[in-house]
Image (cartoon, rainbow, N blue to C red):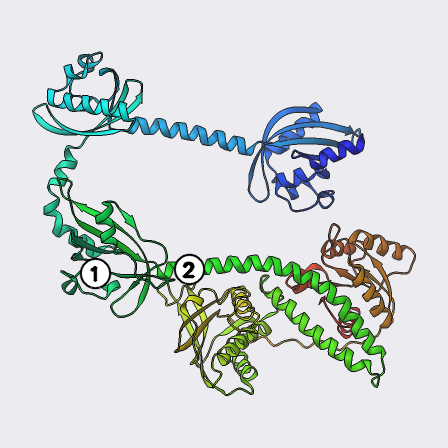
Amino acid sequence: MEEFFRRVIEHTRCAAARIRMPDRTLLYANPGFATLVGSALSSDAMSGRPLHDFVEAQPSTETLLAEVQETGRLEAREARFRTLAGEERAVIVDAVVARSETGASSVVDLLMVDVSPQRAREARLEEDERRVRTILAAIPDSMFLLRDGVFVDFSAKAHNLYVRPEDFLGRRLEAVMPPHVAAETRRLVDVAIATGEPQLQEYELEIAGRLRCFEARLAPGGGSDVLVIVREITDRKAAESALAAERMRLSVTLASIADAVIATDRTGTVTLMNPVAERMTGWSSAEALGQPLTRVFRIVNEKTREAMEDPVHTVLKTQRVVGLANDTALLSRDGSERHIAHSGAPIRSGAGSMDGVVLVFRDQTEERRLQEERIRAQKLESMGVLAGGIAHDFNNILTAVVGNVSLARMHLPPESTATPRLADAEKALSRARDLTRQLQAFSRGGQQERRISPIGPLVRDSVRIALTGSSVQAEVNEAEELWTVRVDRGQVSQVFENLLINAAQAMPGGGHIHVVLENVEVTDQWLHPVRPGRYVRVTVHDTGIGIPRANLTRIFEPYFTTKERGSGLGLAVSYSIVASHLGRMFVDSELGTGSTFWVYLPAADGDEEPVPPRPSTSVHGSGRVLVMDDDVHVRSTLKAMLADLGYEPTFAADGSAALEAYAAARDRGKPFVAAVLDLTVRGGMGGRECMAALKEIDPAVKALVISGYADDPAIVEHERWGFAGAIRKPFKLEELAEELGRVLAR
């Protein structure tokens, strides 16, 4: 039965927790409680931590806990609290003091049901009802209810009434309204009831010696009921009558708006064009007036390049407002191309006839570019999650393979026939490790060691490395007093090597690459959509075959390539690296004229930071070493590697077992000289949590963290988490020996 209740608590959607009072320590929390407070920790990881690690301390929560201690039980009490992420939660709480220790502490069991969605819906319903009441009270229209042609109810402003309520309530329509108005109203009432569709009527009435215009909407209400909503449109009619006199004023307005406007007559001939339309089409008003719209407003489908239907013809045919299809490009008179969004609407006279069409369109080229940038970033982010997981698992496998190969090679005499085979295997494994690091570049840029550096030497070295042995000539122009940048030198060099290699491959018969390095201060009005600030811009232009315009939006996507043997990772990795440095990368190209790439890197404040030399360490050592890793193959490999280096290894599969082993060794007087901790353990305590606990046992503990996640902060900034050293999987025997020796020498 106890197992039954345990399974129920673990799988229920309700939040259950046990809290020790008065220090508010969580003794137990089920998954439902973790979900309620927005914690990603497991139940075991949450246990033993104070409640305020997950819930913001508020008077209401303190009052509730105090009350349950005082009364011993609370039933179906509604309460509110706020998570540390700032999210409000409304819950129904049942609480009971499960155990009391006189004069000391007590244990409170909580069972909570999240009713936040219900309360939010109730609040929305109340707000909707209030809004409807406010709208009805603010509507200036008069409303009447006709039943069998008799006025039975009304809601109207007093100044809008044709006669007093006592003169029309209970009377027939024909007895109240003028004959010509009543006859038309009766006809429309019959049509509305018969068709079930609202009808519209306009009429005039003389009220207090003044002729006033009204618009009535007759909506069927079921049976013989018809709701009549009357709005006075006297002013609107006056405005429509004066519309012709406003044409000059309209021209001034059109000249000042940001959208492009073109008007035509019923034959599709241009009659009006504002300055924005002149700039976008390349036609002046004087040249365009009298021309067919199809000559001035040339649009094609961006993908198929086929001419699109004349929008004026569409509006004239449908007599409705029409919008432009997606992927529409406007071809300017000068040959430039813009992505546009537009709508076409009929121009009607006062009598309702169609006099022409007005087109309103705007340039969305930059908006499209920004949208593509956002989509590309989202794709890279998704790819990063997948790539990081794959690289981690693959690195565990490689660790076992690389370690065993390096062990085997070191134990064989140089004259052995297997020695060159193992050397070839190590080279192949090194390429496999490079591949996983490329995958990790999608995951927040991989491991980075950023230092303030001049960008010029990195670019010149990349030119030398990428173009050695090719027939391509390169010219590098560097501005004087070029600003420094804070970068990971290896990763940024990889960016420029990728760009230069691609440029060289685009010129198989030889060509020229022009590289320009310059300081730029980006403003709101800039060629590229870059956040304002100080940047170093590197421009790489080649004279190669160019890139088809249809591919420009995809070349930064992972695995997109047009090369027979290309991986499709080079530019995607480069884009991700630049983005992780808070920079931007752009491209432009035309077939037959070459390609241009722009790389923006934020300028740094400060001088170059040299790379600190690593102290030399002994390869072999001695003493007991505690190793914690959940992968049995990695443990087996580390056992052989450490033994070969002279150490005595002891192993644990997770952090909890490692803590027990470490404490037991100290108690027996045979302490460990160092610990090697895997960062991530599935379903158990990992290296970060284990390190924090080891510090409590032994503040002088020396630990080395290992992981296949190269970009984890505990690897990049290991000292911040208490580790004396860090090494990425996979690693060779020599790398393990050097890093472990350095840790022990501290």
Q: Can you say which quadrant of the picture contains the N terminus?
A: top right
Judge whether 114 appears above or below 477 on screen: above
Q: First in sequence, mark 1 or 2: give its number.
A: 1
Would you say residue 707 is visible in this rendering? yes
SS class, disc 2: helix
Q: Can you say which quadrant of the picture contains the C terminus?
A: bottom right
Label 1–label 2 contact, CB within 8 A? no
Residue 334 image position (x, y, % from top left): 26, 70
Q: Residues within 10 Å of mark 1 (few under 14, many from 20)?
A: many
SS class, disc 1: helix
Residue 724 image position (x, y, % from top left): 74, 65
Q: Which residue does the image show at 51% across and 57% down from the upper left?
A: 378
Q: Which residue is mark 2?
A: 370
**Image disc number at residue 428:** none
Q: Which residue does the image show at 62% across and 33% down from the upper left?
A: 61
Q: Residues within 10 Å of mark 2 (few under 14, many from 20)?
A: some
Q: Which residue does the image show at 47% across and 75% down from the upper left?
A: 483
Seen in the image, is 261 located left or right of residue 108? Answer: left
Q: Which quadrant of the view contains residue 180?
A: top left
Q: Which residue is mark 1?
A: 275
Residue 589 image position (x, y, % from top left): 41, 73
Q: Which residue does the image show at 44% across and 60% down from the upper left?
A: 372
Judge whether 594 appears above or below 530 on screen: below
Say which of 479 and 135 sits in front.
Answer: 135
Judge whether 30 appears above or below 268 on screen: above
| Amino acid type, mark 2 | Leu
Would you say residue 746 is visible in this rendering? no
Seen in the image, is 279 located left or right of residue 711? Answer: left
Residue 188 image position (x, y, % from top left): 21, 25
Q: Which quadrant of the view contains residue 671?
A: bottom right
